[in-house]
Image: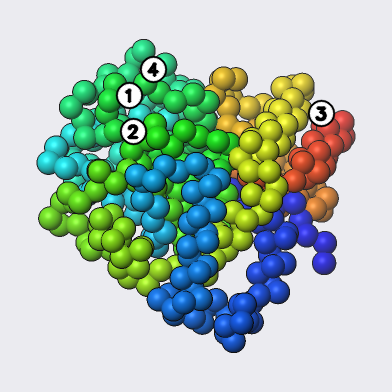
């Protein structure tokens, strides 16, 4: 079998060595005489798998000891609710920066539990930039400020962290976690679904400063209560065991591949290559301001949208999958997560130049 270069936004491409190791261990993990899929989440074998994955993640991101790391079910969208339920701590207002489809979904969900105040929005310009920080109308009494450091659909990414004047900073890093080093101590809470840069769907990682938990709203379901989950080692309910195991393999692959500094270097090269191709032609176009373009998700349009279907068909024939843009914006999107090799981006750029020569 020849594997495609899969540019899908998530579930997304995985490192081949991870898939191969998972295949090797599929029927029996270690000396357990059973598969990871079959073992108790509370047994000794899974405990080793779970702890080793957490330790690797802590090393990769440099997570300080006063942060809890939770491995939960439910996807990032469940965190849109869990964040206000846990972090309001007696307050009634929270701030949100609206930079695209995902942050605005987070706002809608938070509104069920609190006054979610949009401090700034780039909706009017079609989410093609991050509103300048000087224009944010922040509330210094807000329970927290929520940002989406990478908007997976619009392809907009924060390349510097905002100044938050002491308000706890919360980030939905679903689509750029582990793509570069980040100073975890600047955040109150980071959450991310696993199916882009950490493995497969079914697992959501929450990294939260421990002094902020333990005051969830009365109505909070037990499985969404960070304190209960932290005290139970993320096992208030049955943990997403196989996805947790795969995340551990992905973290191992990253550590062996030089850690986040190396991921960042390669990701920058890949993104520069693709944006270079887009900007170097009149045939392709990316609408996002140059200083907030995403390194992870690169949306682009053809100058002749009637060629979209031909482009996608030819791309498939040439071995590329997952290039169709999100249904809300159309066009194309190439996701360049850690597991996408430079070779895949080189091949895509060559294909795009060739397609342009034939059709421009
Ligand atoms: N936030 C971001 C930034 C995302 O990209 C996604 C998924 N594409 C989500 C939240 C929602 O994740 P899920 O559907 O797994 O809950």
Q: Earlier in the sequence, mark 3 or mark 2?
A: 2
Q: Which residue is mark 1?
A: 164
Q: Which mark is residue 360?
A: 3
Q: How is the image coloured?
A: rainbow
Q: Residue 34: x and y, percent?
A: 57, 84
* Circle 4 Cα neighbour tier, 10 Å, few/some/many (<14 / 14–19 / ≥20): some
The x, y position of residue 138, in whole percent, is 26, 22
Residue highlighted by disc 4: 133
Q: Residues within 10 Å of mark 1 (few under 14, many from 20)?
A: some
Residue 116 x, y percent position in the rendering: 23, 35
* Left or right placement of residue 41 versus residue 311 in this view: left
Up-down relation of residue 84 to residue 116 (above or below): below
Mark positioned earlier in the residue sequence (2 or 4) = 4
Viewer-side label of 3, 2: 2
Disc number lying in front (1 or 4): 1
Measured in 3D between alpha carbons, the distance from the residue under mark 2 to the one under mark 4, in whole angstroms, is 14 Å
Q: Earlier in the sequence, mark 2 or mark 1?
A: 1
Q: Is residue 187 above or below residue 313?
A: above
Spatial separation of the CA atoms under disc 1 and disc 4: 10 Å
Q: Residue at x 35, y 63 (%)?
A: 233
Nearer the observer, 204 or 99: 204
* Residue 53 in view in this figure: yes
């Amino acid at each position: 079998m020849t594997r495609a270069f899969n540019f899908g936004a998530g579930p997304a491409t995985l490192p081949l060595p991870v898939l191969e190791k998972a295949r090797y261990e599929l029927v029996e993990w270690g000396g357990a005489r059973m598969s990871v899929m079959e073992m108790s989440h509370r047994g000794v074998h899974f405990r080793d798998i779970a702890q080793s994955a957490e330790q690797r993640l802590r090393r990769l991101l440099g997570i300080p000891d006063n942060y809890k790391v939770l491995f939960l079910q439910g996807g990032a969208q469940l965190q849109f609710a869990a964040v206000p339920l846990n972090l309001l701590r007696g307050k009634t207002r929270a701030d949100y920066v609206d930079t695209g489809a995902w942050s605005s979904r987070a706002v809608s969900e938070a509104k069920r539990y609190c006054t979610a105040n949009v401090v700034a929005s780039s909706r009017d310009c079609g989410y093609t930039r991050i509103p300048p920080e000087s224009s944010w109308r922040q509330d210094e009494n807000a329970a927290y400020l929520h940002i989406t450091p990478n908007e997976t659909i619009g392809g907009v990414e924060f390349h510097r962290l905002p100044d938050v004047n002491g308000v706890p900073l919360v980030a939905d890093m679903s689509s750029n976690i582990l793509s570069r080093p980040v100073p975890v101590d600047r955040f109150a809470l980071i959450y991310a679904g696993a199916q882009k840069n950490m493995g497969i769907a079914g697992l959501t990682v929450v990294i939260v400063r421990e002094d902020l938990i333990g005051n969830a709203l009365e109505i909070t379901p037990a499985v969404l209560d960070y304190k209960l989950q932290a005290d139970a080692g993320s096992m208030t309910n049955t943990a997403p065991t196989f996805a947790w195991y795969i995340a551990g393999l992905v973290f191992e692959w990253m550590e062996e591949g030089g850690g986040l500094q190396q991921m960042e270097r390669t990701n920058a090269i890949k993104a520069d290559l693709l944006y270079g191709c887009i900007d170097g032609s009149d045939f392709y176009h990316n609408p996002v301001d140059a200083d907030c373009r995403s390194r992870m998700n690169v949306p682009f349009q053809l100058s002749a949208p009637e060629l979209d279907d031909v482009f996608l068909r030819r791309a498939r024939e040439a071995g590329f999958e997952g290039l169709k843009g999100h249904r809300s914006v159309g066009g194309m999107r190439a996701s360049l997560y850690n597991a996408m090799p430079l070779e895949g981006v080189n091949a895509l750029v060559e294909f795009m130049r060739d397609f342009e020569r034939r059709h421009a």
